[in-house]
Image: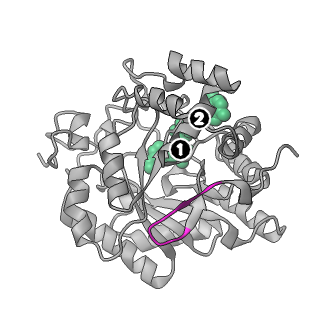
Amino acid sequence: MGTCINPADVPKVKFYTGEEVPCVGMGTFGSDRFTAEQVSAAVAGAIRCGYRMFDCAACYGNEDQIGEVFKAAFDEGVVERKDLYIMTKVWNDMHDRVEESCRKSIADLQCEYIDLFFIHWPFPNYHAPGCDVDSRNPDSKPFSVEEFMSTYRQCEELVEKGLIRHIGISNMTIPKLEAVLPEMKIMPVACELELHVCFQQQELFDYLVAHNIQPIGFMPLGSPQRPERDMCPEDVADLQTPEMKEIAQAHGVHPATIALKWAHQRGQIPIPFSVHEAEYVSNLKCMTEDPLTDEEMAKIATLERNNRLVKGQVFLWEGAKDWHDLWDEDGVIVTL
Ligand SMILES: NC(=O)c1ccc[n+]([C@@H]2O[C@H](COP(=O)([O-])OP(=O)(O)OC[C@H]3O[C@@H](n4cnc5c(N)ncnc54)[C@H](OP(=O)(O)O)[C@@H]3O)[C@@H](O)[C@H]2O)c1
């Protein structure tokens, strides 16, 4: 077995509830490129090397294989259930059957309860797995506060029933948050959003922090293996920028390491994905050593390029102009 990192040495992030969680988790989306077997094997290796937080989702199509890995780790005494922080998400086609989705994830993941349960997208617009970027579902609709809150209420009931410990939201915007936060009984502990050095979402990041909602950054490395449908000619490869290469060279590491250190030092929890042991070990280990300087942090702050990679075209409704409508860029919820 390779390098192990003592989970106690991994810095912690505190939620508004006072609970402390690891400052980095492992992503489990195979991006239509890596099989469920490859991803679950990586999860097994990640537990052994010291990861304790895992970002799963019903729609990643691999929760039952990952569940086998969790069960084996519990049975073999590698970890106890309470040592893991397991996150999953309800997919868009289950917004009116949240408990059913949650119970299936718990059964598949063989984990008794979910630590943090996200609403994956803030609308019920569904697309088939692996669909192409131009496909549209005629049932898709714009965001509705009532619909979102009906889904959120079901999550609140799951907390009351003990099926989930905390609620999370994902792919939100400030106007949507402004509309729904006052309606909530149980505040979300975290929000998953796309965050990487060329897409820093500073305003939304600051808004979340000001509202005691922990930002969890997905695609922290700029997702070089993302599905074809999320690749556009204008996208910037974050880790290839001269600044990232230069800082990486100064530390004698890969630019991926710099991106993760930046994420942690800025205050988000990155959830990098890899099936390669050397990479996922490095992604955890880098949190325990050799921080970036203030000058390096300031230089990376200048790399913002509004480089959104998950544009979400497949969630558009009839009458929507283009993917910009999903992100409320003019400061109001786009409802037409
Ligand atoms: N809430 C949401 O809507 C949402 C959306 C997207 C993603 N997510 C979550 O975020 C997680 C991460 O996003 P992601 O997987 O798309 O992108 P990512 O973590 O930014 O990039 C993953 C890729 O980076 C490369 N990599 C990883 N570690 C590396 C290292 N140390 N050195 C060099 N290269 C490295 C690997 O590519 P190679 O195989 O080529 O080495 C890997 O496939 C997902 O797995 C998922 O859990 C959530």
Residue at screen point 74% across, 71% down: 80
At numbered mark 1, what does the secondary structure look like: helix, strand or loop?
helix
Residue at screen point 51% across, 29% down: 295
| Residue 178 lies in the magenta-colored region | no
Ligand 1 quarter of the rendering: top right
Please state if 110 lies on the left or on the right of 140 as rendered.
right
Examine the image and state in which quarter residue 105 appears.
Answer: bottom right
Q: Which amino acid does label 2 sit on?
A: Leu
Residue that extends furthest to the bottom in the rendered view of this protein: 161
Q: Where is residue 79 in the image (x, y as percent from the top left)?
A: 76, 66
Dot 2 corresponds to which residue? 292
Please state if 193 lies on the left or on the right of 108 as rendered.
left
| Magenta-drawn stretch, dominant element (helix, strand or loop) | loop
Q: Which stretch did the figure color magenta?
A: 11-19
N-terminal label among 2 and 1: 1
Rendered image: mark on residue 180: none
